[in-house]
Image (cartoon, rainbow, N blue to C red):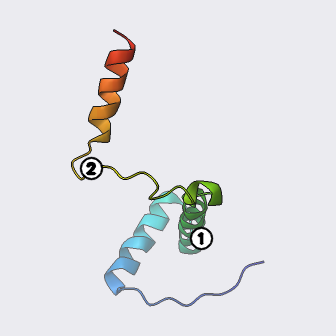
Amino acid sequence: MTTKLTLSVEQSIIEKAKIYAKQTGRSLSEIIQNYLEQLVDESEVNEIPTDLNKLIGVIKLPKNFDEKNELQDYFESKHL
């Protein structure tokens, strides 16, 4: 089921969006709907599971901790 939505957007953005929609053969409604679906999907993916969320803050790391460097050191020591 679709529902009407009224938005306030800068005129220049609307003009550019209409050109983009025409070039891609889609409607503005379709483009905006796809964008909103993508936002919702990303936020659902980014939600931290409750069990994992309980662990946040349990381990205290030094302020200068460099996880990339630590990971590299780990792999180097593992494969030497």
Q: Is residue 44 depicted above or below 16 in this figure? A: above
- Judging by the rendered image, the residue that carries numbered circle 2 is 62
Is 70 in front, or is 32?
A: 70
Q: Residue at x 35, y 86 (%)?
A: 11
| Marks 2/1: CA–CA distance | 43 Å
Q: Residue at x 39, y 16 (%)?
A: 78
- Could you tell me the amino acid type at mark 1? Gln
- Judging by the rendered image, the residue that carries numbered circle 1 is 33
Q: Is residue 8 depicted above or below 38 in this figure? A: below
Crowding around mark 1 (Cα neighbors within 10 Å: few <14, some 14 to 19, many 20+) is few
Is 46 in front, or is 24?
A: 46
Q: Residue furthest left?
A: 64
- Could you tell me the amino acid type at mark 2? Pro
Circle 2 SS class: loop
Q: Residue 80 appears at what percent x and percent y?
A: 33, 8
Choose mark 2 or mark 1, whichever is in front.
Answer: 2
